[in-house]
Amino acid sequence: MRTLIVTGTGTDVGKTVVVAAVAALARAAGERVTVVKPAQTGVAPGEDGDLAAVERLAGPVATLELARFPEPLAPATAARRADAMPVMAAQVVDAVRGLDTDLVIVEGAGGLLVRLNDLGETLADVAAALAAPVVLVASAGLGVLNTAALTAEALERRDVPLAGTVVGAFPEQPDLAERTNLDDLPIVTGAPLLGILPAGLGTAGPERVLEAARCGLGPLLGGRWSPDRCA
């Protein structure tokens, strides 16, 4: 069983779309895929969360949500305000290890060091315990180089491997910063660029997502993209 941890340089950078794209490629290759969301925040009981979006974008995949909190806050804060039990790193690790599947994709909330609980545990602790590589989903524009570099440094301090970076929503007409960031992201993170997905993919159907994943993600994630073919 392979495990992949997906985090972002922030919120709304395309993590769920990247998770769905990787899941779609694995599913098309005949693998059994389970997507795990340790903590879903900002979604009320019975409403569709990120895992519903993954299923809509990737097609039928197994999913597992460990906790849900109604306010759109960091999981630790949302749990505290809801007077609910927070998610513990060991809980996530045990859940992943108990799965019978070929590929597990764990999607975090926000960035790497967003707290799961008031003990200060984060997705980085989950990745370290599972010895699983991390894929960093980055925004395209100005400011991302700093947050990407900080994330890479945090992973390095914890001896957690950074597999590389995916730009989660690249615009059709990129500006200067968006274009040059493609060259600079591997430099500041010390890890390769693993792909570029187009903006707007979050409203697409499974066939379009699979096509975009094949063209926009590199071989490490199951696709055919390569940096020398980058627009």
Image (tube, rainbow, N blue to C red):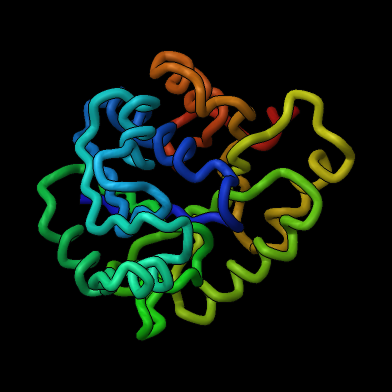
Measuring from the top left, give residue 41's x and y in whole percent: 39, 55
Give the camera-side residue of 183 and 39.
Answer: 39
Measuring from the top left, give residue 54's x and y in whole percent: 36, 34
Give the camera-side residue of 67 and 88.
Answer: 67
Farthest residue, direction bottom: 119
Farthest residue, direction right: 176
Q: Quadrant of the rendered structure where residue 51 is?
A: top left
108 to the left or right of 66: right
For residue 123, say whether it is visible.
Answer: no
Measuring from the top left, give residue 135's x and y in whole percent: 48, 53
Determine the residue positioned at 52% across, 22% down: 212
Determine the residue positioned at 59% across, 67% down: 151
52 to the left or right of 197: left
Q: How many marks?
A: 0
Determine the residue positioned at 29% across, 54% down: 3
Q: Quadrant of the rendered structure where residue 47 is?
A: top left
Q: In this view, does 26 lie above or below 89?
A: above
Q: In this view, does 221 lie above or below 123?
A: above
Farthest residue, direction top: 207
222 to the left or right of 63: right
For residue 101, say whether it is visible.
Answer: yes
The quarter of the image holding the C terminus is top right
Determine the residue positioned at 56% across, 53% down: 11
Q: In this view, does 173 lie above or below 113?
A: above
67 to the left or right of 101: right
Q: Quadrant of the rendered structure where residue 97 is?
A: bottom left
